[in-house]
Amino acid sequence: MALREYVDSERVAWQVWEVIPLSAERRRLRERRIASRDENDRRLRDEMRLRMSDGDSDGWLVFESYGLKKRLRPIPKGWFQASNTELESMCARANRASRPTPRLIE
């Protein structure tokens, strides 16, 4: 995972990283199998699965500062080499996360 840190023009420190899901939920697609699945197939188990919104399977950038988290979709090409000014512009376009999730180390 690539991680960048920068300080914006208002002297707020930000961390930025990309999130790319390993596998998007594909259950919305039509079944391509001809034969039905075996009753023991793991995909038929009643498990909690993450459903992804359209566009989320391509990933997003996370901008995090103390008490604030924002997401930008899609991931801009070359974001890791962007200047602090360009990162600040991307952050301004990002949507605020509905509820910040606590970090595992906190």
Image (cartoon, rainbow, N blue to C red):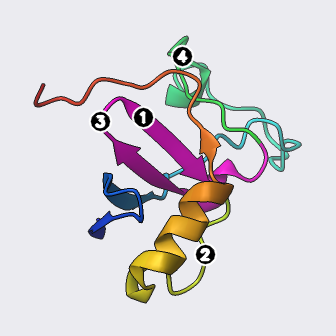
Q: Earlier in the sequence, mark 1 or mark 2?
A: 1
Report if residue 36 is visible in the image.
yes
Residue 57's label in the rendered image is none
Give the residue pinned by disc 4: 45
Range of residues picked out in magenta: 54-72
SS label for mark 1:
strand
Q: Amino acid at mark 4?
A: Arg
Contact between marks 1 and 2 (CB within 8 A): the answer is no
Residue at 61 percent across and 57 percent down: it is: 92
Label 3 – label 4 distance at C-alpha? 39 Å
Report if residue 22 is visible in the image.
no
Q: Is residue 96 magenta?
A: no
Residue at 50 percent across and 28 percent down: it is: 42
Residue at 33 percent across and 52 percent down: it is: 12
Q: Amino acid at mark 1?
A: Leu
Residue 5 placed where, x, y %? 26, 65
Mark 2, mark 3: which one is toward the viewer?
Answer: 3
In this rendering, the answer to whether 39 lies above or below 89 is above
Residue 38 placed where, x, y %? 62, 28
Label 1 – label 2 distance at C-alpha? 20 Å
Using residue 47 as the reference point, say whether residue 65 is left or right of it: left
Contact between marks 3 and 1 (CB within 8 A): the answer is yes
Q: Earlier in the sequence, mark 2 or mark 3?
A: 3
Give the residue pinned by disc 1: 68
Q: Amino acid at mark 3?
A: Tyr
Give the residue pinned by disc 2: 76
Mark 4, mark 2: which one is toward the viewer?
Answer: 2
Residue 66's label in the rendered image is 3
